[in-house]
Image (tube, rainbow, N blue to C red):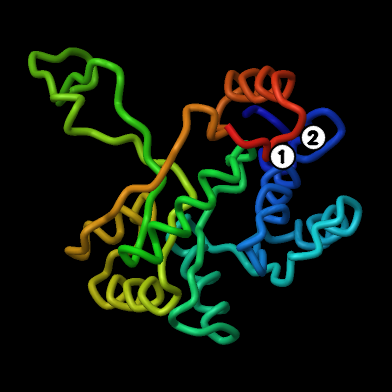
Amino acid sequence: MHQDIPKQFITINEKPVIVYTMEAFQKHSEVDVIAVVCLKGWEDILSAYARQFGITKLKYILQGGKNGQDSIRNGVFELEKHFSPDDIILIHDAIRPLVSQDIITDCIEKAKLYGNATAVIPCREAMLQTEDGIASSNIYQRDKLKRTQTPQGFHLGKICQLHRIALAKGITNSVASCTLMVELGEKVYFSLGSEKNVKLTTIEDIDIFKALLITQRSPWLKE
C-alpha cells in the first residue's frame, strides 16, 4: 500500500478500514462475539476505535503472530478457552470491509450443515499455467477453479484440532484456513462470495472500495 500505517487502519471517508469490517459482524444477528488478532502496538488504537464506533461485540483483542497461520492459531487457541468445541467460528480478513450480511449468513449456514465453509466466487478469467512466470503453453480449465475469499467458517474444536495436527507435521505457513484443511486431507465446502467482497491489497483496491462505498448506503448493505 506504500502507507506509513497498516492497511487495516487506513482511514477511508473518516472511518478506518477495520471498523467497516467489524461493523458488518456487529450488525449480524447471529454473531455473538468479535475477536481481533491484532498487530502488536495497535491494540489500544483498535480498542479506542471500537468504543468510538460502537463495536460492542468486540470482546477479545489477541496477539498476532509471524504470519497468517500463526495469527489464526493464536486466535482460535484463545477462543477455545472460552467457548464450546461445537460453536461456529468465522475467520475473516480485516481488509475485506464490504462483506455482506448474506455472505456471513450463508457461511454460518454452510458451516453448520457441512462442518466447514469457505466463501468462493467463480473464476471467470482465462487461466494459464506457467513455470517461469514469463510465458505459458498450457491452459487450466476455469470451470474447475474457485477463487476463495473470507469468511471461512468452522466448528471451533475442529479448527483447533487441525492447527495442532499442522504443528505436529511442521506445516507453519499455509496460505489460508481452507488451504490448511486441504493440506491435511480434509474436504472444503463452499459458501456464498461476491466480487464486491474485495480484499484491500493494493492502492487500486482502495479506489475500488471508495467507488463501491458511493454506490451503497453502508458497507453491510445486502447485495
Q: Quadrant of residue 144?
A: top left
Residue that numbered label 1 is attached to: 17
Circle 1: element type: helix
* 57 to 110, vertically: above or below: below
Residue at x 37% of width, y 33% of height: 121
- Element on which disc 2 rests: strand
Q: How many marks?
A: 2
Q: Residues within 10 Å of mark 2 (few under 14, many from 20)?
A: few
Rendered location of residue 104, percent (x, y): 54, 50
| Figure check: 6 above or below 177 | above
Q: What is the residue that sits farthest to the right in this orientation?
A: 52
Q: Residue furthest left?
A: 137
Q: Amino acid at mark 1?
A: Val
Q: Which mark is residue 11?
A: 2
At a point 29% along the width and 17% down the height, the residue shown is 125
Q: Residues within 10 Å of mark 1 (few under 14, many from 20)?
A: many
Residue 135 % position (x, y): 18, 13
Q: Which residue is painted at 32% across and 29% down in the image?
A: 122
Image position, residue 220 (x, y; %): 67, 40
Q: Quadrant of the C terminus?
A: top right
- The reply to whether callout 1 and callout 2 are in contact (CB within 8 Å) is yes
Kind of residue indicated by mark 2: Thr
As rendered, which of 179 and 103 lies closer to the eye? 103
Task: State which quadrant residue 221 falls in.
Answer: top right
* x and y percentages locating residue 86 in the rendered image: 44, 80
Depth check: 7 or 23 in front? 23
Q: Quadrant of residue 187?
A: bottom left
Left or right: 133 in relation to 215: left
The mark that comes first in sequence, 1 or 2, is 2
135 left or right of 53?
A: left
Relative depth, front residue between 143 and 48: 143
